[in-house]
Amino acid sequence: MQTVTEHRRKDIHNSDIPAVCSACEARHGGVCGTLTPDQLLDLSRHSTRRRVEPGREVVGQGEMTDSYANIISGVVKLSKVLSDGRQQIVGLQFAPDFMGRPFTRESALTAEAAIDTDICSFPRNVIERLVSEAPGLEHRLHEQALKELDEARDWMLTLGRKTAQEKVASFLYIIATHIDPENGTATEFDLPLSRADIADYLGLTIETVSRQVTKLRKDNVIRIENSRRVTVPSMDRLMHVAGID
Amino acid sequence: MQTVTEHRRKDIHNSDIPAVCSACEARHGGVCGTLTPDQLLDLSRHSTRRRVEPGREVVGQGEMTDSYANIISGVVKLSKVLSDGRQQIVGLQFAPDFMGRPFTRESALTAEAAIDTDICSFPRNVIERLVSEAPGLEHRLHEQALKELDEARDWMLTLGRKTAQEKVASFLYIIATHIDPENGTATEFDLPLSRADIADYLGLTIETVSRQVTKLRKDNVIRIENSRRVTVPSMDRLMHVAGID
DNA sequence: GCACACCTTTGATTTTGATCAAGTTGCCGA
DNA sequence: TCGGCAACTTGATCAAAATCAAAGGTGTGC
């Protein structure tokens, strides 16, 4: 599931065009979905596709506004840090999402790959030009922003009001529902984050995360093959532990 | 500052038109700013202005998507609750903002006035019609969504990684910078939230909030006239305590 | 002026999760 | 197959914030 099948040549046969997401429209409803064939071709000429290794920055703090990208496969962590190094992951972007901040002042965000991640990026000005031509595109970007806002607010409830146990269960539930959206909620999956990343996502320490994962295992809420691989026998049970009604 | 001056008759003299924000465009750059005079008139015919008392719901959980509103004066709390009653305020909307979720599935949010609040609201379908006519309007809404997303993510860092002391200082800083945006950062202001609300915003208990406020006072970071009125002698000092570099 | 309600503060104690400190496990290259 | 190292787990102790429990304040109606 982590590697993407080569499905792009279906639409575009010109080998001068870099490998891009022009054909992704069906697969992951990226920005491409709202464009005309001409605009798609235009976009593809300015796009570059590349693989980002875990821990590598997709775009640096502040540069976020300079480019815009579809995530083809993988998971990207968006995080913020305090001056003394305390870190908080403020969002996870999964494969069908796209990333970037058109029109806004830079936000002090770091975006880095959590696992091997393929992205397809284009310069900001190209997107802005296309937005002015294709009214549907801004609508698409707006919806993505609203979706991220909803997710951020859900997560605020988790960060502010849930116990460590509920936080870890909530995290597992998020991963189960997002890791392979095409196939719905997954009952068996690889965690895309290390214990340290999970701690930074949940506002906990790695020791607490580890202990709570152990507790969930002992309580038979999850099964653990190795530290990354998780099986959820009953999603209802997990949701209940996560405090999701 | 809490009461709004009557400045609406400047533009619209027809007494059939309900009291609306048609004239707010300059004052608070609400949705009106991007509309033509005709569209403004159209909008104003469908708007109702009303005052909402503290604690009153502006729109209920789930209804959020059915209407759309400019906040003329006051402060609105957006909150989420767990089934057992634990509550988290996930956003504060101040006077020049507008509220509502066009195009999206309902999000389980409650919006209620924190203090006396004047709002001007219109049905969702009117906004959606105007969006399809005025391309600039969607752009405006999109920018508002991105602004709220940035604020939500900043707050996630506070919720997940700051101490109680830093959280309370961060809260005071937010209020200082948002309570009267026209006049920049305020050094003396009334808190729009009770201790219980502050606790729900910060993911703390009221006792902890109270103790931290007392500590900030004893450390001369703030002065307190009564439990609501706060003076900040040095904004730099407050920011430092809040962990804002 | 008084009583009641509500909000806030303060104090004592408990609990949750952080911190400090070893161990394990598993993976990779030699 | 064996180190070596990084990631993870587990245990012991500590500290920050929650909880439990009383007081203070402040405002309102009587």
Image: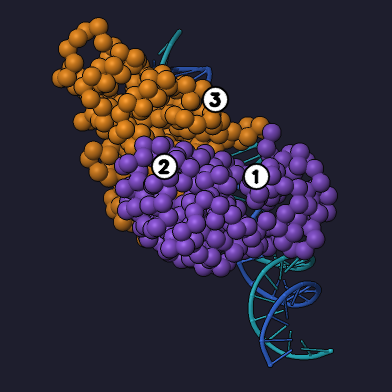
Chain colours: A orange, B purple, C cyan, D blue
Q: Chain of mark 1?
A: B
SS type, badge 3:
loop
Residue designated by label 3: A62
Q: Amino acid at mark 3?
A: Gly
Q: Amino acid at mark 1?
A: Glu
In this rendering, does residue B241 appear at all?
no
Q: Position of residue A120 (x, y in %)?
A: 34, 21
- Image check: A106 left or right of A98? right
Chain-order first, disc 1 or disc 2: 2
- Image check: B184 left or right of B10? right
Q: Position of residue C15 (x, y in %)?
A: 59, 61
Q: CA distance from mark 1 to mark 3?
A: 27 Å
Q: Residues within 10 Å of mark 1 (few under 14, many from 20)?
A: few
Residue designated by label 1: B182
Q: CA distance from mark 1 to mark 2?
A: 25 Å
Q: Chain of mark 3?
A: A
SS type, badge 2:
loop
Residue depth check, mark 2 versus mark 3: number of the one nearer the observer: 2
SS type, badge 1:
helix
The numbered dot on residue B36 is: 2
Residue depth check, mark 1 versus mark 2: number of the one nearer the observer: 2
